Image (cartoon, rainbow, N blue to C red):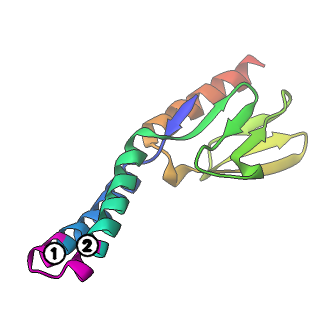
Amino acid sequence: MKVRFARWLSVLLMVLGAVPLLLGLWLWSQGSAEGGLPTALAGLALFAFGLVYLWIPYFYLADGRLVVPILRGPKAQTAIPARARVDASGDRLTMTVGTRRTDLPVRRAMAHSGDWATLQDRLVRDAEAR
């Protein structure tokens, strides 16, 4: 299952990028290229990140693994054993194997609320089916 980023995060990045972008363009139009261009480029980069966050997934949970595409290193992919119980009822995703509970590198606040609710429903149905 694919879970997207929360919309507030995308909007925040776009707003934080729009302010320096507009300021940089204004400075550049006033004849200050050395101050305006770097400011506008930094704002454009932030704004672009905000746009990208509208489409890229926050994480995938499928086929016995959790994949977080924006992470690098060992936390980017986590194997989920078949006997593990994954829970999304708290503020983060957790995996329980026997009596050992492990917090996974995914937080509810960063996830799209509709996708998180769908994930919770699916995890409850899967747990009841076992």
Q: Is residue 106 visible?
A: yes
User: Which callout, 1 or 2, points at the residue further toward the start of the chain?
Assistant: 1
- At horizontal 73% and vertical 51% (from top left) the residue drawn is 75
Tally of marks = 2
- At horizontal 36% and vertical 60% (from top left) the residue drawn is 45
Q: Is residue 49 magenta?
A: no
Would you say 24 lies left or right of 102 here?
A: left
Pointer 1 and pointer 2: residues touching (CB < 8 Å)?
yes
Viewer-side residue, 76 vs 8:
76
Q: Is residue 103 visible?
A: no
Give the labeled residue for mark 2.
37
Residue 120: x %, y % from top left: 58, 34
Residue 67: x %, y % from top left: 66, 39
Viewer-side residue, 116 vs 41:
41
Which quadrant: the N terminus? top right
Would you say 113 lies left or right of 97 here?
A: left
- Secondary structure under badge 1? helix
Which quadrant: the C terminus? top right
Give the crowd class for mark 2: few <14, some 14-19, many >=20 residues within 10 Å: some
Give the labeled residue for mark 1.
28
The three-letter code of the residue at mark 2 reads: Leu
- At horizontal 72% and vertical 26% (from top left) the residue drawn is 127
Residue 65: x %, y % from top left: 74, 33
Residue that protrudes farthest toward the top in the picture: 129
> Which secondary structure class fits the magenta region best?
helix
Q: Which residues are magenta?
A: 25-37
Viewer-side residue, 63 vs 49:
49
C-alpha span from label 1 to label 2? 6 Å
